[in-house]
Amino acid sequence: MKSIANVLALLTLTIFLTSCGTAVKQLEIFKVEEPRAPLNLESPQTPKMESINWVIITSENADEVFAKLKENGKDQVLFGLSDDDYELIAKNFAQIRAYIIQQNATLEKYKEYYEPTETNE
């Protein structure tokens, strides 16, 4: 009796295992190419820079510059830089400009990759 129960259990288990094997469908991975979604990125607008009035003060014209500021109703406060510090500001702006150019080039490469034109395909 025990052997018949074991055989029936083994047959039942075999039937369940073989029926599961036929229900699995083969996956179609890497067979269907999906088109890339467009990024829809706009190029950043160049900011509008405000004009700055530079005043160069020397020991000869300091009194005249402060008198002109007072006459125009402006505060008689000026922020000064040495010639070395002015060069550092120019270098910093050049680095910022180069970084922005690099970022714009990266955006263009992303656009070329995700939104290729028909001539590139």
Image (tube, grey):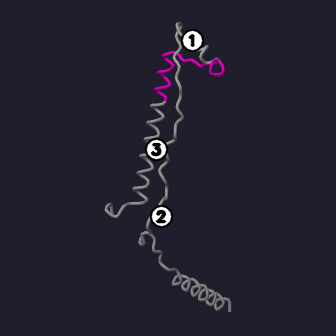
Relative to 60, is 17 above or below?
Answer: below
Circle on res. 64? 1
Under mark 3, the amino acid is Gln
Q: At numbered mark 3, what does the secondary structure look like: helix, strand or loop?
A: helix
Task: Name the residue at the front extreme.
Answer: 71
Circle on res. 37? 2
Instruction: Answer with mark 1 or mark 2, whichever residue precedes in sequence.
Output: 2
Q: Name the spot of residue 16 as percent of width and height, x first.
A: 59, 85
Q: Is residue 86 magenta?
A: yes
Bounds of the magenta segment: 71-92
Residue located 46% across and 38% down the image: 99
Residue located 53% across and 83% down the image: 23
Q: At numbered mark 1, what does the secondary structure look like: helix, strand or loop?
A: helix
* Cα distance between the residues tagged 2 and 3: 21 Å
Relative to 14, is 89 above or below?
Answer: above
Instruction: Answer with mark 2 or mark 3, whichever residue precedes in sequence.
Output: 2
* Cα distance between the residues tagged 1 and 2: 63 Å
Front in this rendered view, residue 10 or 101 = 101
